[in-house]
Image (cartoon, helix red, strand yellow):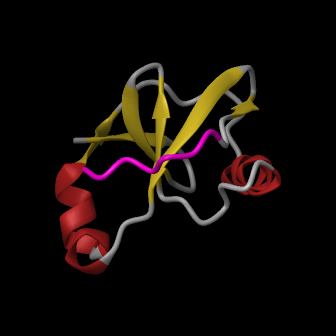
Amino acid sequence: MAIRQTDQTFEYQGLRFKPLKKLRGDEGAFYTITRRCHDSELTPANWSYRDFYRAATEAGSGDIDVFELSGIAVIPSTNVLFEYR
């Protein structure tokens, strides 16, 4: 996984997120993503996809698909954060 060289780290619900990458080509295909997503159990209790991406956009990371949280690559979805392996 190519790592994005930037420090547009931001906080959402007390958790620190670091932008990693935008999915491109085949890696952004629904089938590919679903095969790599796993339950992370890291989703905050009051998760809001919209509010998360608002915070990401304010930090300059609104175009990113994969973030790092506590050393784990995650993909935000409508209802949960998925671990991306």
Report whether 9 appears left or right of 68. right
Instruction: Residue at 19%, 66% (x, y): give it.
Output: 32
Q: Nearer the viewer, residue 83 or 41?
A: 83
**What secondary structure predominates along the stretch shown in magenta?**
loop
**Quadrant of the rendered image containing residue 40:** top left
Q: Please give left or right for residue 78 compared with residue 28 in the image.
A: right
Q: Is residue 25 magenta?
A: no
Residue appearing at x 30%, y 52% in the figure: 2
Outermost residue, front side:
5
Q: Position of residue 10 (x, y in %)?
A: 71, 35
Give the mark count: 0
Q: Quadrant of the C terminus?
A: top left
Residue 79 placed where, x, y %?
55, 48
Which region is colored magenta? 1-7
Q: Position of residue 52 (x, y in %)?
A: 71, 47
| Residue at the extreme bottom of the image, as rendered | 25
